[in-house]
Amino acid sequence: MNGSQTTSTAGGGASATAIAHPNIALVKYWGKRDERLILPVAGSMSMTLDSAATTTTVRLGGAADAFYLNGKRVDGKAAQRVSVFLELIRERAGSCECATVVSNNRAPTGAGLASSAAGFAALAVAGAAAYGLQLSREQLSALARRGSGSACRSVIDRFAVWHTGADDTSSYATQLSAPEMRMVVCQVNSAEKAVSSREAMLLTRDTSPFWGAWAGHTERVLSRMITACEADDFTALGEIAEAHALQLHALIMSAEPAIRYLEPVSFAIFDVIKQLRESGIECYATADAGPNVVVITRPRDTVVVSAKLAEFGAVHTAAPGRGAYLSDNHLTVPECHA
Ligand code: PMV
């Protein structure tokens, strides 16, 4: 699949552009059994959104890697993470060419709305194409995983299961079909979170008294979720997703010192969703590593749910979207840095 949209310009190296979207987990990933390879302790499942796209262009050339995000040059930790990831692609491609990465991201960065998942899915697909690697969807998913675990699911169309796998090549996501649904995203706070999910996972593993139960429980939840999807059972999907989200946050809060991503307003939304449910509108709430809440609903109920959530923050509705794909619309280095 790669290669067709790779261009080579006079005076510049090969370049490729990819577009990817965030994914929101319905069965959460939390914890790694291998920090370097980013192998998870349990499987997980998510919906890839059709909104908040990240577009990333990788252009080969230059004396060093450079990273531009939303019009600004980025240095430090974030740029290093991009470079380490490019190094992985270079090793596989047998290349030592540096690259300039230009990325535009429509979701707030680091606010628990899966911006890093969309970012690394786009970088994996664009980077592999720019360096001339011919990879299957599974291989692209496994590659994206090395940037940020949950990114392996944003490579997949619509709904994805991330299989724990045994090693670097067998831990990737594949597609599954799920009941027709929408996600209503309620952004109550777009500030970057104080504790990254990477650090929080480590602290949970090292200090939570409940850690020992987590992986086995999540595997059982995933298998119930897959059964619900196979049966096209929206109610079971919603109930399983909401319960697992709250279990994740209870686990995170049980770390020492405690980490709390959910804010009072997040809990208020969970309460309102329960009330809506009791009034006959079937909807369920979930939240990743941040205070923002995502509501799972049937397509016909999105208007009512959105109106209710608008009291709490900025709201948008997402349908199941496309996994990361190549595009011809290449980004250029922002003017002020060119
Ligand atoms: O992929 P990371 O390291 O950003 O971790 C994501 C963790 C959660 O969003 C909380 C859960 C998930 O499955 O996406």
Image (tube, rainbow, N blue to C red):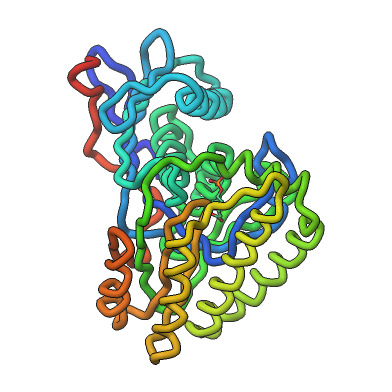
- The part of the image, by quadrant, that contains residue 198 is top right
Q: Nearer the viewer, residue 88 or 281?
A: 281
Is residue 214 shown to the viewer in this render? Answer: yes
Along the line of sight, which residue is nearer the eye, 302 or 42?
Answer: 302
Q: Quadrant of the C terminus?
A: top left
Q: Farthest top residue?
A: 63
Image location of residue 156, percent across then percent down: 46, 56
Q: Answer with the quarter of the image where residue 203 lies.
A: top right
Residue that extends furthest to the left in the rendered view of this protein: 335
Q: Residue at x 49, y 66 (%)?
A: 267
Does residue 6 sit above or below 137 in this rendering?
Answer: above
> Residue 210 is drawn in which quadrant?
bottom right
Residue sticking out furthest to the front: 264
- Residue drawn at 37 percent across, 59 percent down: 49
- Specify whether residue 39 is in view: no
Taking the image as shown, residue 264 lies to the left or right of residue 167, namely: left
- Indicate the position of residue 37 as horizontal and vertical percent values: 67, 38
Determine the residue positioned at 27% across, 67% down: 310
Residue at 47%, 38% in the rendered image: 134
**Relative to 325, is 147 above or below?**
above
Image location (x, y in percent) of residue 197: 57, 44
In terms of depth relative to the viewer, which is nearer, 311 or 81?
Answer: 311
Say which quadrant the N terminus sits in. Answer: top left
Q: How many dots with numbers?
A: 0
Judged left or right of residue 54, residue 46 is: right
Relative to 217, say whether 48 is above or below. Answer: above
Image spot of residue 40 (x, y percent): 68, 50
